[in-house]
Image (cartoon, coloured by chain):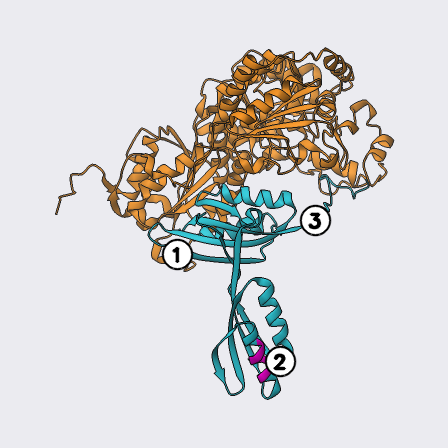
Chain colours: A orange, B cyan
């Protein structure tokens, strides 16, 4: 028998996990220890290549890894224990699945002989996480571990990215087996995402685009996921064609907000010009977006007169909500590259001057306008000032979920991809603070700001402690209106102004809270003090909690009321109580 | 269109529903059936019939046959959702190919004496059902055929003393020399 004692590939399961992380270039790992992962933590202790960031709650580890992944294009890696460690990850996994964020989550599990016995801290992790991961594995044999780990990284990062879970029982972590470095045969042969678009479909798309009189490009998070090349090609395409472009919440930054063809975000709280352009267009090019219900409004009245081209790497995104005429399955960068080449070689750019004149009229409605106020800080104004005062800096923005998120999307201009981290699909309150932690870990010298609401931020506020421990100078910019603003807005608009449990009677003193955690607390009450305080916040090289007291009852407009189409938007100046009551089906009077 | 106050767009779709038989070739690994079933329950798709067994043990391949109903858009979505699962090799819509044979097997227990017993036996013969168990007061018939034929046989047995039925669900295969 061959002596294996000196074979460097003979190691424990726990050592294999750390080795695999190193082999996949992982530099940072977010996690929380517990009984079922102690062997892995012991290995982490004895090496220095992978830095472990200790969070305060497993959900925070998940969102931090999401922020890390979204801002770098690399997979985020999480390590949590069995039972509650795994269940606390469910929200972050689902969030990553909905927004196509590559996460590799390693969970500890009770020893194999105890599985199914209701052992201490046991849960059916693969069962619970099956619907909220792209794929998951329970590894029962240490000799399968290397293959599974390598496959996990490949599945998470290839095709449409997403979260994966590898569940490793404690006895497998202790057991000694054979490790091998990543190799091609580690992947299921049944898994082969398509990246190159069909040439004849691309020709059809070019023919449609060249014949358009009223075209629009509608891009999404897929362009960001595809990498910087996709954003560059998208910009080239816009530049070459002169077409107007709008984007989903997830796609902000792929085309610069300062670009002359930029219409602003579309959808429920998108701009008037973006939604009208979508409604009245004759050819729509959808790149890496999925016709989500926040985007389409009423589907039977969605862009009724247009031919639709849809580029997506996931075939299940095609014809899911909206029927399209020319589907192209493939990676955005790959397909955009081919499309641009064919367009330049074989077709002429259409003349769309009249279309731009029409769009100029819609733009003139100035749908993001709000009345100025010298006494109270309006949340829109606060974001505008934050944007102006951080312009030109190396800035990353994360958000929580609610009104502040929509205002951030409307009023903060993104010039580059990977600069905007938000929970779009799942709408997870509490995402932004831990996501900012993850972004700052990846970009220690950049300015990382979590634009937050007073309600959302309290869901994961304990991660301030993580920021302090690792000297991560994140800025938590709270638009504090003392309400769950978006909930209240819907209650006002849809439920007869009965504000059921959307007001927080007992908010903490955020400044004292910041100090208690070892952060810096700032509070601003008046518009006149805002600029100075924001500058102070930027200058402080420590974590800052910024309590920006804003108008309590401000609502987020423009808005597509429920059951309405893109051309039935409610604009801010029209949003009087009467008009709002009529616009919303059900017509409940507002008090 | 008036809808109740909601942050979602409430729509009822009235496209006609179709029944489709899907053959799904999967890697036979732990949890693969749970993934497929979870997809159907999680996304609100129907399962009318589901049959699964390993078909090529050397390659660890299993074949799942699913009969489902939905609008054409939903059927298309089901196929894409199945196809993108990591352990799924292929999804073939047997109904769309129009060249498939569908069979199921049923075991039908009938209890009775006298004329009922004679009639049950006579009908079984007409349907080419075999007797696989008999007592002086009961039979178990084994019948194979398409779903409609088996339904018809069961309906006929009902007044003759039908006790219980065990069915395999539909298995399907394409006609001609090619495999899926």
- Which residue is at the front of the view, B64 or A562? B64
**Residue receiving disc 1:** A115
Q: Residue at x 43, y 31 (%)?
A: A75
Q: Are marks 2 and 3 in contact (CB under 8 Å)?
A: no
Work out whether A126 lies above or below A46: below
Quarter containing the C terminus of chain A: top right
Q: Which comes sooner in the sequence, label 2 or label 3?
A: 3
Q: Are marks 3 and 1 on the same chain?
A: no
What is the secondary structure assignment of the residue under circle 2? helix
The Cα atoms of the two marked residues, 3 and 1, are separated by 46 Å
- The disc at residue A463 is none
- Mark 3 sits on what residue? B16
Q: Which segment did they paint magenta?
A: B118-123
Parent chain of label 1: A
Measured from the top left, where is residue A463 in percent x and y? 50, 33
Toward the viewer: A522 or A342?
A: A342
Q: CA distance from mark 2 to mark 3?
A: 37 Å
Residues indicated by labels 2 and 3 sit on the same polypeptide chain: yes
Find numbered disc 3 in the image and state the secondary structure of the residue it sits on.
loop
Instruction: Determine which residue is flagged by label 2.
Output: B160
Q: Is residue A179 left or right of residue A26?
A: left
Marked residue chain, label 3: B
In this rendering, does residue A544 appear at all? no
**A80 relative to A215 in the view: left or right:** left
Q: Please report, as a chain letter, where disc 2 is located.
A: B
Q: What secondary structure is the magenta-colored segment mainly?
A: helix
Q: What's the residue at 40%, 34% (across, down)?
A: A154
- Position of A561 with respect to A211 (left or right) is right
Query: Is the residue B160 above or below the residue A37 in the image?
Result: below
């Amino acid at each position: 028998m061959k002596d294996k004692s000196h074979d460097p590939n003979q190691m424990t399961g726990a050592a294999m996990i750390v080795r695999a992380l190193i082999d996949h270039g992982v530099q940072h790992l977010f996690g929380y220890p517990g009984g079922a992962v102690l062997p892995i933590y012991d290995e982490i202790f004895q090496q220095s290549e992978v830095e472990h960031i200790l969070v305060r709650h497993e959900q925070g580890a998940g969102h931090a890894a999401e922020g890390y992944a979204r801002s770098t294009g690399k997979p985020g890696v999480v390590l949590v224990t069995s039972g509650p460690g795994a269940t606390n990850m469910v929200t972050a996994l689902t969030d990553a699945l909905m927004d196509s964020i590559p996460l590799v989550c390693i969970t500890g599990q009770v020893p194999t002989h105890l599985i199914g016995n209701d052992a201490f801290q046991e849960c059916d992790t693969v069962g619970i996480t099956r619907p909220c991961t792209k794929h998951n594995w329970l590894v029962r044999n240490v000799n399968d571990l290397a293959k599974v780990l390598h496959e996990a990284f490949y599945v998470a990062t290839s095709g449409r990215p997403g979260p994966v879970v590898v569940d490793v029982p404690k006895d497998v972590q202790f057991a000694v087996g054979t490790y091998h470095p990543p190799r091609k045969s580690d992947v299921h042969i049944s898994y082969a995402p398509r990246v190159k678009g069909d040439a004849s479909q691309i020709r059809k798309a070019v023919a449609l685009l060249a014949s358009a009189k009223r075209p629009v490009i509608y891009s999404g998070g897929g362009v960001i996921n595809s990498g910087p090349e996709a954003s560059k090609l998208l910009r080239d395409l816009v530049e070459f064609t002169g077409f107007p472009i709008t984007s989903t919440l997830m796609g902000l930054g792929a085309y610069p907000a300062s670009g002359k063809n930029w219409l602003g975000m579309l959808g429920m709280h998108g701009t008037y010009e973006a939604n009208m352009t979508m409604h009245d267009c004759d050819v729509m090019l959808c790149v890496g977006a999925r016709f989500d219900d926040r985007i389409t409004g009423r589907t039977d009245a969605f862009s009724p007169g247009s031919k639709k081209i849809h580029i997506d790497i996931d075939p299940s995104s095609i014809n899911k909500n909206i029927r399209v005429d020319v589907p192209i399955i493939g990676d955005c960068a790959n397909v955009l590259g081919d499309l641009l080449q064919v367009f330049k070689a074989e077709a002429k750019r259409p003349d769309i001057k009249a279309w731009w004149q029409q769009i100029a009229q819609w733009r003139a409605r100035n749908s993001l306008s709000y009345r100025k106020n010298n006494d109270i800080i309006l949340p829109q104004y606060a974001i505008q000032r934050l944007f102006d005062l951080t312009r030109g800096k190396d800035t990353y923005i994360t958000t929580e979920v609610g009104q502040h998120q929509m205002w951030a999307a409307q009023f903060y201009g993104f010039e580059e991809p990977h600069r905007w981290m938000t929970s779009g699909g799942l709408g997870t309150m509490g995402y932004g603070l831990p996501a900012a932690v993850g972004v700052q870990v990846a970009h220690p010298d950049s300015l990382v700001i979590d634009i937050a609401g007073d309600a959302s931020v309290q869901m994961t506020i304990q991660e301030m402690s993580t920021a302090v421990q690792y000297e991560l100078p994140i800025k938590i910019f709270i638009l504090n209106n003392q309400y769950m603003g978006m909930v209240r807005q819907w209650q006002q608009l849809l439920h007869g102004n009965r504000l059921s449990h959307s007001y927080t009677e007992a908010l903490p003193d955020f400044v004292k809270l910041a100090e208690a955690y070892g952060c810096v607390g700032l509070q601003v009450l008046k518009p006149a003090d805002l600029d100075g305080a924001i500058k102070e916040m930027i200058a402080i090289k420590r974590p800052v909690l910024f309590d920006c007291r804003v108008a309590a009852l401000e609502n987020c407009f423009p808005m597509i009321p429920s059951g309405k189409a893109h051309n039935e938007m409610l604009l801010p100046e029209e949003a009087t109580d009467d008009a709002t009551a009529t616009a919303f089906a059900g017509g409940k009077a507002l008090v | 269109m008036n809808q109740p106050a909601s942050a979602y767009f409430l729509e009822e779709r009235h496209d006609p529903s179709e029944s489709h038989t899907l053959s799904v070739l999967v890697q036979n690994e732990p949890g693969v059936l749970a993934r497929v079933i979870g997809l159907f329950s999680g996304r609100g798709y129907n399962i009318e019939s589901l049959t699964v067994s390993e078909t090529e043990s050397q390659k660890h391949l299993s074949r799942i046959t699913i009969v489902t109903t939905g609008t054409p858009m939903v059927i298309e979505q089901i196929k894409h959702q199945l196809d993108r699962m990591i352990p799924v090799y292929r999804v073939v819509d047997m109904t769309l190919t129009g060249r498939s044979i569908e069979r199921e097997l049923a075991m039908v227990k009938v209890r009775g004496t006298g004329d009922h017993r004679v009639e049950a036996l006579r009908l079984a013969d007409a349907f080419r059902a075999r007797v696989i168990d008999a007592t002086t007061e009961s039979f178990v018939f084994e019948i194979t055929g398409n779903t409609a034929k088996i339904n018809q046989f069961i309906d006929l047995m009902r007044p003759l003393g039908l006790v219980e039925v065990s069915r395999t669900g539909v298995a399907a295969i394409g006609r001609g020399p090619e495999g899926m």
